[in-house]
Amino acid sequence: MRSFIACILLACAFGFASESMFGNMASKSVVLGEGASTRGAAALTPMYAEMAVDTNYVLGPGDFLDLMLEDKYLSIQVYPDGNVAVEECGAVNVNGKTFGEAQRLILDLVSKRYKREYCFVQLAALKKYRVNIMGAVAAVGQHVLDPQNRLTLFIRAIGGLLANANPEDIQVIRGNDTIHVNYNEMTMNGNFENDIMLQQGDKIYVPFVPMGDNVSLMFPGYRTSVAYSPERTLADYFELAGANRMHNYGYKAVCVREPDKEPRWITLADMKTTTVAPNTEVEFFVQELFVYVGGAVNYIGRYGYNPTWHAIDYIASGGVNPNTGSWGQVKVWRGPKPEAVTLNVATDPILPGDFIEIPKSHYESFKDFTLFLASLLSVISTVFIIYTTNK
């Protein structure tokens, strides 16, 4: 019985000693935990900056700071009211302060408890911010941006500009100032000075191209417009429309439709010297276009369309002989329901799908009529002789 009681007492003593030992270890870990101070998830997120963030960086709500206070390592954030709080030291407002100014304020605060020479403050994570964008963009409204976000990156991130946007005068409203940015200068000519860094509270407006004061460009499956300017050529409109970045489908010809004028066709080379009126439509064709030639030529059939050619060029390609074909009576059949159009073979334009008819010369027509009469008289005489013989 005594041995049993002794065993029980020994077990209790061992349990008490174990609890005391592990309790002391637990209390020590808590102390270490307070010293290490668990860092927030935002502070652990990797930072990506276009350039080094110096002491002129302006702090605001959402920024995270890392503090080394002697043997402690803390992560603190700037709260919505602009304050940062350091345990056992208090709080200080750093909103709108540069990082250098905030460093001094925080070090003044913690030096009441810690040795200043063993304290250090650094940026851990940069704040995100909101900007508003309106106008000719794919997604209007308010957007949250990552730190150090430039205008071009932001526009691409929200889906880009609409086809009827005027990228030559994007307006960034910052406080009481309006910054005018030529987006085309950046994207076409690499003028990166205009690619400004956006800031908290920026308001961006992308204007539309005014109706009736533009030039529309039509590509396979895509249509866009560019603001009209009298000195611009079609090559300029082509570049401003961003067509150089589109897939090259191998354009065969260009159709220009100016208001109140007949459509005209030009080559791609002619675009560098061709100017147009406001509200013009320019269509780029990729399918092979043909002109059809028939009548008194050696080679009847279809010919590839060439905007610089006139009827005489197609007739010459067909191998007409002036003795057999008539130049003065050439007709062109044109339209969905073809109608004959009389034109000048050397100066009037030919359109894709036209049928050029070259009639026979008067001599050939008279010769054919004579042969027809001779054949007819021969048949009649044969029938008369047969009839007389039978009688």
Image (cartoon, rainbow, N blue to C red):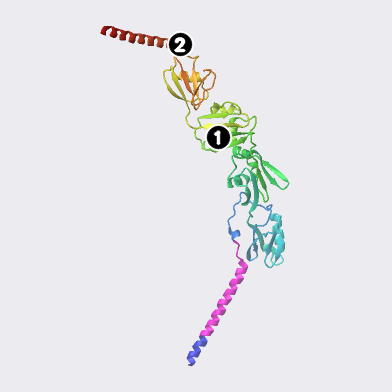
Residue 52 is covered by the magenta coloring: no
Q: Residue at x 40, y 11 (%)?
A: 368
Q: CA distance from mark 1 to mark 2?
A: 47 Å
Amino acid type of the residue tagged 2 in the rendering? His
- Crowd class of label 2 (few under 14; some 14 to 19; many from 20; radius 10 Å): few
Mark closer to the chain start, 1 or 2? 1
Q: Secondary structure at mark 2?
A: helix
Q: Could you say which is closer to the camera, residue 337 or residue 97?
A: 337
Residue 218 has which mark? 1
* Relative horizontal placement of residue 376, taking residue 167 as reference (left or right): left
Q: Residue 127: give x, y in percent of width and height.
A: 64, 55
Q: Magenta includes 28?
A: yes
**Along the viewing direction, whichever of 218 and 149 lies nearer the viewer:** 218
Image: 195 above or below 72: above
Residue bearing the label numbered 2 = 362
- The residue type indicated by label 1 comes to Met
Which quarter of the image is occupied by the C terminus?
Answer: top left
- The residue range painted magenta reads 11-40
Crowd class of label 1 (few under 14; some 14 to 19; many from 20; radius 10 Å): some
Q: Is residue 295 above or below residue 116?
A: above
